[in-house]
Amino acid sequence: MNVGKIVTQLAVLAAVLVGVGVPIPEAGIVIAVLGGVAGYYSEDRQGLLISAVALSIVAGGLGAIPAVGGYITGIVEALAGVAAAGAVVSLLVATFEKVKP
């Protein structure tokens, strides 16, 4: 297992924990850093960008599900943060690769 997969799994775990309400100090920074590192090691940039957009769109509409809607919304919003941070870093890496000689 490579570093990218391990960091991605840690990012998803952190997003799920934050989404269900586990208090993690500086959770936003943890999610952003793990998402950024996962984006750096990502091999599927297009999938990451699509995931970031899709999760951001879907995140707000899941609260209407009875009993678990709040938890699912929290998890999806945290995953959207992970994907957004990864997408930004992935775009920066792609830009750097195009520009470097």
Image (spheres, grey):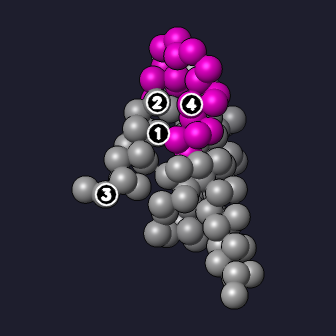
Secondary structure category for the residue under label 2: helix
From the image, state whether disc 3 or disc 1 is nearer to you. Answer: 3
Q: Residue at x 56, y 31 (%)?
A: 30
Q: From the image, tell me which residue sits under label 4.
A: 30
For marks 4 and 2, the one nearer the N-term is 2
Q: Residue at x 62, y 63 (%)?
A: 90
Secondary structure category for the residue under label 1: helix
Q: CA distance from mark 2 to mark 1?
A: 5 Å
Return the x and y of residue 39 as percentages of the image width and height: 55, 56
Looking at the picture, does residue 25 appear above or below residue 31?
above
Report crowding for label 1: few under 14, some 14 to 19, many 20 or more residues within 10 A (C-alpha). many
Type of residue at label 4?
A: Val
What residue span does the magenta drawing correspond to?
Answer: 16-35
From the image, state whether disc 4 or disc 2 is nearer to you. Answer: 4
Residue 2, numbered label: 3
- Cβ atoms at labels 4 and 1 below 8 Å apart: no
Q: From the image, tell me which residue sits under label 2.
A: 14
Q: From the image, tell me which residue sits under label 1.
A: 11
Report crowding for label 2: few under 14, some 14 to 19, many 20 or more residues within 10 A (C-alpha). many
Q: CA distance from mark 2 to mark 3?
A: 19 Å
Return the x and y of residue 54 as percentages of the image width and height: 63, 54
Q: Is residue 22 visible?
A: yes
Q: CA distance from mark 3 to mark 1?
A: 15 Å
Return the x and y of residue 29 as percentages of the image width and height: 63, 30
Q: Residue at x 64, y 28 (%)?
A: 28
